[in-house]
Image (tube, rainbow, N blue to C red):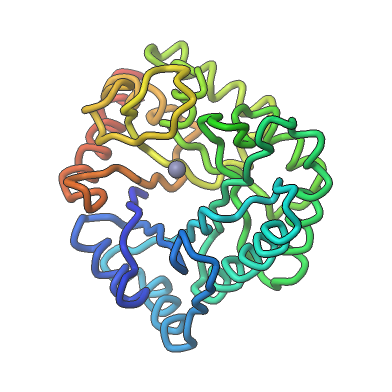
Amino acid sequence: MIGGHVSAAGGVMKAFENAHAIGANFIQIFSQSPRAWKSQMVSDEEAAYFKRELANQTNGLKGLVIHASYLINLASSDRDIFAKSQHALIDNLESAEKLGARGVVLHVGSHKGSGLESSMDGIVSSLLRALKSVDGSCEIFLENTAGQGGSIGVNFEELARIIDAVGSSKIGVCLDTQHLFASGVSYSTIEEADAVIQQFSMILGIGRLGCVHLNDSKTALGSLRDRHENLGEGLIGANALSNLMSHPDLNGVPVILETPGDSKGPRKRDVELARKLIGEGRSRRGL
Ligand SMILES: [Zn+2]
């Protein structure tokens, strides 16, 4: 499954067309404006359309995830922002459930230097509350971060602490290759790539991996900066991405491009390149 983050401007039905145009069989969308608090609930008509397309696998569509609003900060010490974050997470999860999405990809937030410990209670209670208030099978996938400004999830241990404290089967991880690299993790060789997946398995459990964000990086290893680049055009490079993505444990895990393209997001050739990279890695591994 190779997907792309696509625009849902003009309605979620548009997202389906946009994904088909770039040859993606998996979709990631925002269910509301990612930089506004105002929620936009998915209509019954849109939900029915999406569920039907998914069930029929029209144009090969295998599934979708929702990317939660960027404003959400479950670690905020500001009561107003914290309350808005809790509501926004519930709204996003509700929309995702209605559309038949596998999960909501979430950046947990930032402790702004005070450390994860001080914000653990708020994070855990918010996640539990969201999972409790929305019935269904849709999960929350916590995304690893580049680590800028105290963003939570800079390593597998931080994600594991939250996941263990929540203690729900409906919580998983979205692994972003650019954030991983920017946080200081190298996978330039097959051995290094294998070590990354081994660490993931030991600390989080590979079964928690809900999806991968496949992006190259505009910024250097350990830069702690979240800046995506087109595959093969950044500082990670095609070879390293291929090493990581061809790991057999990633088989069947949805892969989503969030690359800039020509400023409008992933293009058809980016999706094709992703397939090619994974295929080449598998050949090198003798798979
Ligand atoms: Zn991402």
Quarter of the image with the C terminus is top left
Q: Is residue 116 left or right of residue 156?
A: right
| Callout count | 0
Residue 275 is situated, as x and y percent measured from the top left of the image, at: 26, 39
State left or right for residue 274 relative to residue 101.
left
Residue 150: name its quadrant: top right
Residue at the far bottom: name it: 45
With respect to residue 3, does 88 lie above or below?
A: below
**Residue 139 x/y as whole percent:** 62, 58
| Residue at horizontal 57 percent and vertical 46 percent from the top | 107
Q: Is 124 located above or below residue 99 in the figure?
A: above
Q: Can you tell me which quadrant of the image ligand 1 is in?
A: top left
Task: Tell me if residue 241 comes above or below residue 88 in the rendering.
Answer: above
Which of these two is toward me, 197 or 249?
A: 197
207 and 231: which one is in front? Answer: 231
Q: Residue at x 48, y 56 (%)?
A: 67
**175 sits to left or right of 73:** left
Q: Residue at x 60, y 36 (%)?
A: 151
Percent x, y of residue 16: 30, 69
Residue 236, position in %: x, y?
Answer: 33, 22
Q: Quadrant of residue 221?
A: top left
